[in-house]
Amino acid sequence: MSDKITNILLVGVGGQGILLAAEILSETCMLAGFDVKKSEIHGMSQRGGSVVSHVRYGKEVFSPMVPEGEGDVLFGFELMESVRALPLLKPGGTVIANDLCIAPPSVLIGQEQYPADLAAKIAGRFPDFILVDGQNLAIEAGNARAANTVLLGAVSKRLDIAENFWLEAIERMVPRKALEVNLKAFAIGRSLA
Amino acid sequence: MKEILSGNEAIARGAYEAGVKVACAYPGTPSTEILENTIRYKEIDSSWATNEKVSLEVGIGASFVGARSLVTMKHVGVNVAADPLFTLSYTGVNGGLVLVVADDPELHSSQNEQDSRNYAKFSKVPMLEPSDSQECLAFTKLAFEISERYDTPVMLRTTTRISHSKSVVEFGERVTGLAEPKLVKDPAKFVMLPGNARGRHYIVEERTRTLSKDGCSMPINRMELRGTGIGIITAGISYQHVREVLPEASVLKLGMVHPLPFDLIREFASKVDKLYVVEELDPFIEEQVKALGIEVVGKEILSLCGELTPGRLRKGFGLPELAASAAEKLPGRPPNMCPGCPHRGVFYSLNQLKAYVSGDIGCYTLGFMPPLSAMDTCVCMGASIGMATGAVKVLSPEERKKVVAVIGDSTFLHTGINGLMDMVYNKGAATVIILDNRITAMTGRQDNPASGHTLMNEPSNAIDFPLLCKAIGVKHIRTINPLDLEECKRVISEEMERPETSVIITDKPCVLIKRDGVFTPGAVLAVEEENCTGCRACLKIGCPAIEWIPSSGKKGKARIDPLLCNGCEVCRQLCKFSAIQEAK
């Protein structure tokens, strides 16, 4: 095993299921035999605030936080939050983002506008960018709520972990009745990247 | 067995393995999940106390009769529990007692950034500080051994990045063979009258000296010698950032941050050319190293404020920044009250009445945010009522009417009740609103003495707030439906006029309560576009389910997200054009 540490950031809005996706990712890394650390902030972020979860894996991980400017993959559940987290990425990093805009309070009440052309902004700075229509692909898989798993599938193709570990982690972490839909959503995501 | 655990989960596991029988806490981010995990072990009696002082007293009681007990709280909780803590240091323990304190550098979810290591020194209690989840488990077990071996409570300090980070942990077994709890009478040790306490103080000072000496050979205080160029003394999460950013540096990793192992520090200092201390918040280790006459660099290069990150450490050591992309100016995304939250109507009414709102700590502190903008103060748990009393003592009769204290059910029972007793006793003419949503919501829905259930999910007494206020001596007590704007505004304004103490209690539950029959959502609402005039009245409550669509119609219209709406009907009462109706 090389000493290389892989740094992944999962960002979005409180309530989007980011913490569960980060759990599945960490579990996968552990099953694949890596040391893994994950860090995030609970508390206030649960009330619809910005959420950033850091997952790092490799031979031996020290800090649980992705060092600024060393992120390998940004896994964005919402567009504006994806752009907010770009400074954490390394030059040439990968962005896999859900094509979804959730208005923050100032936009909801008409005080500010939701910024335009965010996807173009990401593409301009990070050529390795996949914009995923998570909602519709999840509906295709059988349930709109499986959008995170579609994204996870796309991310999985960019990481050096065999597919069987991903599937085992999903089987461990996802409730049985939602398993079939999630496995299908994961396969759809994997076919994108 | 190997699992990925958060620091908090690992502390709970460590407590189980240490043979803990009693675990007690008041919820507080980032410490809350420890007790939510000790309930997985049936051998541990886990409970939420009314406040941190009571939780520590429960732990002391169990310790004195011989049980190992765990008490957990956030950093500011120690301010509340400080009174028993300082004297517990004198009595020592019978069964081991560990107090976990979770600090919050960067104020992710707190009102200040106090550094609890100062409490360890101040109260003369040893403090351990783990650097990852495996150490959280191991140090919790070790803390109980130290507690019993040195006859002292032991503090275990975490920070948010330790409590809420996850890493791989290997489990052990629960210890066996601990003595069964039984009544012990030892007044010279446990009755802290001056005659007894005077003698105990000498024991405490000797204990600290012994621990400092023994700490030099404890494996948790270890030298990692690499080069002789630079040496770094560090502990907790900072250790991980140091290993990340400065992999070649020699490190003295301290697992016990109070008392410090002075001889080991001297030895380490002698082995390196340049010595640094890397620590978050206060120069706690640095000042003590300087007091030994050792030259060391610390806060000259690292901030006293906020948490440490690998990037901030790089900057401190003059290493180049790595960021590839500059930060973008984007609308912020602060947290917000949930759709259907019963607090929203109250804060809208307080805004309309131009009240001076003496605030408190809980979800309702978000009433500060625009567009509700109806909170003027927030200092600490329970402060709202006492502060209102102070304000009305000195204001003119006209301004006095504007003073309204707001406080949640759990916060009222935590320390607000003392403030209300004082207000009644000293004839404070202010209005107090108890926002009773049946749960401790902000920290993630914990039960409390008014919710009717215990942490172990057993049905229990639910405090009757009107009866309680009556017993305290409040003459004017009214219960309102906070989702009825007309009622809210009318009742609050009537009570504000009254030149006496009055209490208003709201009676709708938190929308996040999952227990059957407590919260039931109403019918989902929708904006009928043809009737929406774009007047923006419904936006004044700041509901996350209502979105302004600038492109709709001539000047924009509102839209309700059917997936988010909980059918509370507060927005419907604001629409003069009957454009908000049940969704078809």
Image: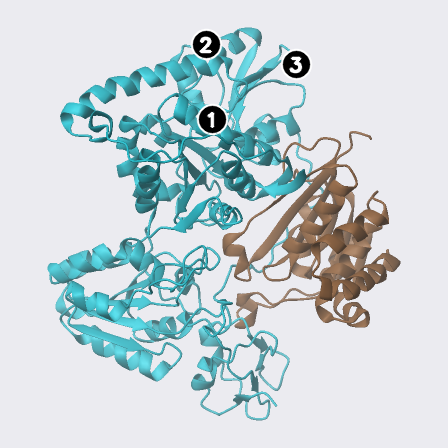
Chain colours: A brown, B cyan
Q: Residue at x 60, y 33 (%)?
A: B172
Chain containing the residue with disc 1? B
Q: Residue at x 55, y 74 (%)?
A: B545
- Residue projecting furthest to the right: A191
Q: What's the residue type where badge 1 is placed?
A: Lys
Front-most of residues A181 and B296: A181
Neighbours of disc 2 within 10 Å: few (<14), some (14-19), many (20+): some
Location of residue B454 (image quadrant): bottom left
Query: Can marks 1 and 2 be said to lie on one chain?
Result: yes
Question: Which callout, 3 or 1, points at the residue further toward the start of the chain?
Answer: 3
In the rendering, at what x and y percent does residue B580 appear? 52, 87
In the rendering, at what x and y percent does residue B495 appear? 21, 75
Neighbours of disc 3 within 10 Å: few (<14), some (14-19), many (20+): some
In the rendering, at what x and y percent does residue B318 appear? 61, 26
Question: Which callout, 2 or 3, points at the residue further toward the start of the chain?
Answer: 3
The residue that disc 1 covers is B299
Indicate the secondary structure of the residue bearing disc 1.
Answer: loop
Neighbours of disc 1 within 10 Å: few (<14), some (14-19), many (20+): some
Assess whether mark 1 and mark 3 are in contact (beta carbons under 8 angstroms).
no
The residue that disc 3 covers is B226
Q: What's the residue type where badge 2 is placed?
A: Asp
The quadrant the C terminus of chain B occupies is bottom right
> Can you tell which of label 1 and label 2 is closer to the viewer?
2
